[in-house]
Amino acid sequence: MRRLCFLFLLFASVLPAQAAEKITVEQLEHRLADAHEKPDQDLAKQIGGLELSERLSSVRLAKIQAALPGGKSRLALLALADASAFLQLPAAEILATAPPDADTEKLILSRAAAYLVSSIDKLPDFIAEKTTTRFHDLRVLDLSQDETPVVREHQAFQLLDRFSNSVSYRNGEEVNEAKGKQGKILSRPSNGMVNWGVFGPLLRIAMTDISKGKLQWGHWEQRETGPVAVFQYAIPKEQSSYTVKYCCFGTPNTSLRPFETAPPFHGEIAIDPASGVVYRLVLITELAPSDPVFRAETMVEYDSVEIGGRAYICPRKSVTVTTAVTEIVHQGRCADATDDCGPVEVARPKDTSINDTEYHSYHVFGSEVRILPAVSTDQDGRSLPDSQGQAPQRVSGP
């Protein structure tokens, strides 16, 4: 008869947070320029020990990444930039142009509302690819049956995984299917914040809630297409329609379950003043202290993409950052091989996760088919022109 081992709580020591060196974007550029001869792995470690005090824009990130020696340092820089996505730009990148008057502000916002109504409803059915790179800052050392694990919070962000999804947008709704190597369909990751609605619903919710909350002028930012107007907003809980969905959390002896809430939130929205196109949306939630998720922030950047030969404004990049309690389970060693040892809870530290998602390879859903005339060939098997003197054309696929 098998003997049962009693369960017990073995709490690992959670070490103090690692102090990162805070620097500006300009200091980062100088630091990396001076270290261009360093090996890729060493440079990645150096970047991992930094924290930006201002936002590193996507345009500036791409320029810096291009000069780095390899994949490890580029990933480290990507995590560093994503962690700064909710900060203000460097002062030098904010235009000194005078703010618009009250009537012009209303006109810009009304154009944005009209843009959402006219453009989102006119999006065609399409398929796109999205590639998600996930990082987290929790490190667990010596997790074995013989040693007590050591948990370190707030370490340099480490790569968790990377996966691709085919996104189908049909009848105003998006459907995701994760794909692994050789196109095999995989289940979507079951942990972390669920990113949803980036192809329209998220903007609709934000604009609807903004109209009921507090809105104030922010500043002008420069894009390649011209200046954009940045507004800052705050939405109280009673007016919030934005839902945070997080999967999954649990407590000892309970099953994992999802967390969902509609908290107050604030952020900013960047609008083209002439067309009303929204190029950037930031949502920063204000979660309750009793919630198992302490931080949930989302940023989406939009840009012009071609779908079926026409230009549409669609997502190009999104970043979500969450901080939540995670549970580390340690299996203790039994007295002998016949013992039935249950899991042992080791610790419940905080883990900050970053999801970086790039949207690309947009194309219209379906196929284009053309009916071709019968093909005549000569004695050598070569195609002959038809009666109109035109060579036959091939059928085009998706």
Image (cartoon, rainbow, N blue to C red):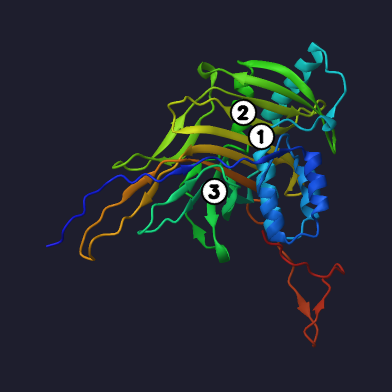
Query: Which quadrant, please, contains the C terminus?
Result: bottom right
Above or below, 363 relative to 222: below
Identified by mark 2, the residue type is Arg
Residue 336 position in % (x across, y down): 22, 64
Q: Nearer the viewer, residue 205 or 296?
A: 296
Whole-Å distance between the Cαs marked 2 and 1? 9 Å
Q: Please state if 170 lies on the left or on the right of 145 as rendered.
A: right
Identified by mark 3, the residue type is Asn
In the picture as drawn, the residue positioned furthest to the bottom comes out as 379
- Mark 2–mark 1 contact, CB under 8 Å? yes
Instruction: Identify which residue is drawn at 72% across, 49% down.
Output: 308
Q: Mark 1 highlights which residue?
A: 120
Q: Please state if 325 lies on the left or on the right of 372 as rendered.
A: left
Q: Nearer the viewer, residue 305 or 329?
A: 329
- Mark 1–mark 3 contact, CB under 8 Å? no
Q: Mark 2 highlights which residue?
A: 204
Give the tally of numbered discs. 3
Whole-Å distance between the Cαs marked 1 and 3? 19 Å
Q: Nearer the viewer, residue 231 or 170?
A: 231
Which of discs 2 and 1 lies nearer the camera? The answer is 2
Above or below, 315 relative to 238: below
- Mark 3–mark 2 contact, CB under 8 Å? no
Residue 18 position in % (x across, y down): 58, 42
Which structural element holds mark 1?
Answer: helix
Mark 3 or mark 2: whose residue is earlier in sequence: 3
Mark 1 or mark 3: whose residue is earlier in sequence: 1
Q: Please state if 127 lies on the left or on the right of 70 as rendered.
A: left
Whole-Å distance between the Cαs marked 3 and 2? 20 Å
Find residue 176 and name its label: 3
Residue 190 position in % (x across, y down): 46, 48
